[in-house]
Image (cartoon, helix red, strand yellow):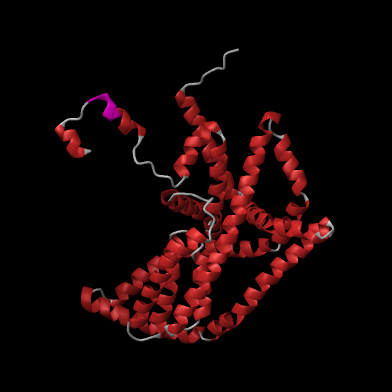
């Protein structure tokens, strides 16, 4: 029986409707899907440790518990190490506010002198901007509080994912036809390997960048150097955009706490060197090369992730696209999409080769080409 072919406009309409429905579902189910997504990544990271404990004849349940306790201990030690810096920052916050207000007053005077914009007009413009952003700030605070609430669900999700790992894998194998079993196995194996190597490499990179940031800020005499260095390393995990915010924070701190602009210039130079080391030495050697997403789509998916799920979406965007690319590369009809996401750049496109074979180009076409 011949398969019925639908017109292009019907296929495109159905595809567009499916994309809209998917985006709508992702936005409205954010509070449920975000912790589950993080739990899947954490469970994949802890799986080798669970298998290690099981190799010592420890039961499956206790192997999961021991692995989770080690992860909680490491996270707790990092938070305890940073707590003194956070407490000191909170104690000096009123002084920082006073210095920032004084700096703002001088800036207003400079704007009035250079541009003739009265201070009361500047205050009105600033007030209007703040009023227009209240809804955004409220949404951000609400998202932060919701994130803190679901953090307590993460250990439960991680434990259950690790406990029911065999059940989930059997479902993925059985839901597809038997002739696709090998292909499904390759996709699952490569997905697990890609996420594990990418996340482990990302954590090692963040540790080194945090040490470099903190050392540079301490040499420059910036207050709360360790806290700002660690925050900068965490923000650096967000491709391309996080690095800019990471530089802005210590520059703002130096502007508020120090006179002149030598410290700000030193921070920009130091962070520029660190970014060069990170992009050209640390990332190629430490972070897994299996996550080969080109720069264009890396920026796009980070922005889309932020629009869908906020800051958590930015962190989840690259691992998610890496999984999608692995699936695309393994399915024949989707391989062109996998190539589009990848970082291999061809020297010529096929249309250009066809045009060159078609006819001899004119002088004008040679100039344009």
Q: Is residue 356 magenta?
A: yes
Asked whether 43 or 17 is in front, the reply is 43
Asked whether 86 or 128 is in front, the reply is 86
Q: Position of residue 355 (x, y in %)?
A: 28, 29
Tell me if I can see residue 30 in this picture.
no
Q: Give left or right: position of 287 versus 277.
A: right
Figure disc tally: 0
Q: Residue at x 46, y 40 (%)?
A: 339
Vertical placement of 365 versus 188: above or below?
above
Q: Position of residue 288 (x, y in %)?
A: 54, 55
Q: Residue at x 27, y 29 (%)?
A: 356
Vertical placement of 210 versus 63: above or below?
below
Vertical placement of 144 versus 20: above or below?
below
Q: Which residues are magenta?
A: 355-359
User: Quadrant location of residue 72?
Assistant: bottom right
Residue at the top extreme of this rendering: 1
Q: Decide whether the magenta segment is chiefly helix, strand or loop.
A: helix
Asked whether 218 or 314 is in front, the reply is 218
Q: Give left or right: position of 306 versus 49.
A: left
Asked whether 206 or 284 is in front, the reply is 284
Q: Position of residue 90 (x, y in %)?
A: 55, 82
Q: Position of residue 158 (x, y in %)?
A: 72, 57
Residue at the left extreme of this rendering: 363
User: Quadrant location of residue 243?
Assistant: bottom left
Q: Is residue 159 magenta?
A: no
Q: Residue at x 43, y 70 (%)?
A: 274
Q: Quadrant of the N terminus?
A: top right
Q: Quadrant of the C terminus?
A: top left
Tell me if I can see residue 287 in this picture.
yes
């Amino acid at each position: 029986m011949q398969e019925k072919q639908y017109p292009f406009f019907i296929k495109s309409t159905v595809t567009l409707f499916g994309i809209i429905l998917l985006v709508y579902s992702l936005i409205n189910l954010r509070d449920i899907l975000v912790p589950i997504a993080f739990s899947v990544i954490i469970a994949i990271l802890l799986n080798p440790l669970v298998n290690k404990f099981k190799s010592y004849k420890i039961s499956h349940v206790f192997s999961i518990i021991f692995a989770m306790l080690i992860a909680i201990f490491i996270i707790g030690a990092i938070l305890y190490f940073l707590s003194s810096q956070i407490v000191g920052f909170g104690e000096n916050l009123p002084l920082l506010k006073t210095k920032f207000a004084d700096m703002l007053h001088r800036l207003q005077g400079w704007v009035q002198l250079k541009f003739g914009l009265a201070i009361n007009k500047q205050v009105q413009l600033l007030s209007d901007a703040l009023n227009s952003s209240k809804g955004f700030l409220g949404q951000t605070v609400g998202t932060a509080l919701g994130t803190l609430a679901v953090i307590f669900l993460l250990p439960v999700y991680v434990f259950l994912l690790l406990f029911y790992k065999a059940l989930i894998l059997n479902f993925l194998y059985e839901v597809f036809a038997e002739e696709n079993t090998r292909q499904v196995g390759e996709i699952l194996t490569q997905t697990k390997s890609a996420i594990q190597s990418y996340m482990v490499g990302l954590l090692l990179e963040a540790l080194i960048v945090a040490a470099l940031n903190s050392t540079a800020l301490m040499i420059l005499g910036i207050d709360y150097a360790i806290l700002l260095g660690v925050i900068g390393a965490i923000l650096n995990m967000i491709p391309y955009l996080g690095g800019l915010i990471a530089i802005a924070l210590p520059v703002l701190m130096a502007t508020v706490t120090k006179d002149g602009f030598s410290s700000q210039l030193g921070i920009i130079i130091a962070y520029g060197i660190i970014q060069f080391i990170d992009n050209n030495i640390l990332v190629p050697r430490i972070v897994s090369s299996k996550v080969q997403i080109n720069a264009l789509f890396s920026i796009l998916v980070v922005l889309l992730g932020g629009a869908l799920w906020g800051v958590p979406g930015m962190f989840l965007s690259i691992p998610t696209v890496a999984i999608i690319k692995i699936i695309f590369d393994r399915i024949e009809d989707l391989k062109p999409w996998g190539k589009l996401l990848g970082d291999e750049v061809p020297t010529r496109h096929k249309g250009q080769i066809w045009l060159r074979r078609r006819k001899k180009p004119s002088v004008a076409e040679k100039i344009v080409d």
